[in-house]
């Protein structure tokens, strides 16, 4: 049984760290007495946002655990501040790639896992899926999607062979 582990992309984490650090530095160098109350509130909200980005990027840079593990039987998605989610290949229908764009620029990319639904008999619902955020991983989306589809196909073929031998 071969496991594939995927970690956070150090380059993405470093870019987030630099951008957040620049904005936090600019906040401290800003003379807030010269601006209106509205601008001060906006600057404070920006400071909070970029401080959280700074903390998040530092956590990603020093994280030693994988963010995604793929085995022959399941996918384990590790979240930064929540419990890991385990999805067995027996519960998976398919995978598809989706990205979010803002003014034509791709901001995030996910691989969605469409799960089987016992209640709806094959009809997919937006509530029976999981997602893998690919843009923070150290792997290309196409490579990961190909690996996932290969593992799903192999798992389904193995189950068909086992069920055929039992009959």
Image: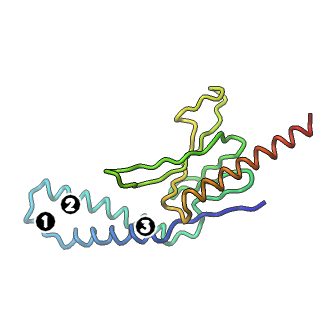
Q: Are marks 2 and 3 in contact (CB under 8 Å)?
A: no
154 to 28, vertically: above or below: above
Whichever of callouts 2 and 1 sits on the residue coming sooner in the sequence is: 1
Q: Position of residue 107 (x, y in %)?
A: 39, 55
Q: Are marks 3 and 1 in contact (CB under 8 Å)?
A: no
Q: What is the secondary structure assignment of the residue under circle 3?
A: helix
**Which quadrant does the C terminus fall into?**
top right
Which residue shows up at 66% across the image and 42% down it? Answer: 92
Q: What is the secondary structure assignment of the residue under circle 1?
A: helix
Q: Along the horizontal axis of the image, is 14 left or right of 127?
A: left
Q: Which mark is residue 57?
A: 3
Q: Are marks 2 and 1 in contact (CB under 8 Å)?
A: yes
Coloured how? rainbow
Q: Which residue is mark 1?
A: 32
Q: Position of residue 4 (x, y in %)?
A: 67, 62
Whichever of callouts 2 and 3 sits on the residue coming sooner in the sequence is: 2
Whichever of callouts 3 and 1 sits on the residue coming sooner in the sequence is: 1
Which residue shows up at 26% across the image and 59% down it? Answer: 46
**Which quadrant does the N terminus fall into?**
bottom right
């Amino acid at each position: 049984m071969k496991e594939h582990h995927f970690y956070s992309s150090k380059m993405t984490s470093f870019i987030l760290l630099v951008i957040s650090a620049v904005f936090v530095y600019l906040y401290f160098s800003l003379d807030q007495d010269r601006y209106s109350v509205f601008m001060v509130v906006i600057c404070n909200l920006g400071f909070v946002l970029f401080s959280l980005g700074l903390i998040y990027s530092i956590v990603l840079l020093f994280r030693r655990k994988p963010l995604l593990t793929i085995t022959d039987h399941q996918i384990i998605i590790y979240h930064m501040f929540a419990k890991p989610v385990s999805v067995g290949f027996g519960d998976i229908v398919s995978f598809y790639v989706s990205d979010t764009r803002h003014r034509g620029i791709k901001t995030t990319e996910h691989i969605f896992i469409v799960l089987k639904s016992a209640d709806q008999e094959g009809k997919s619902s937006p509530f029976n899926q999981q997602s893998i955020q690919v843009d923070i991983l150290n792997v290309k989306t196409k490579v990961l999607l190909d690996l996932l589809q290969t593992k799903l196909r192999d798992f389904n073929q193995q189950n068909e062979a086992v069920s055929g031998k039992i009959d």
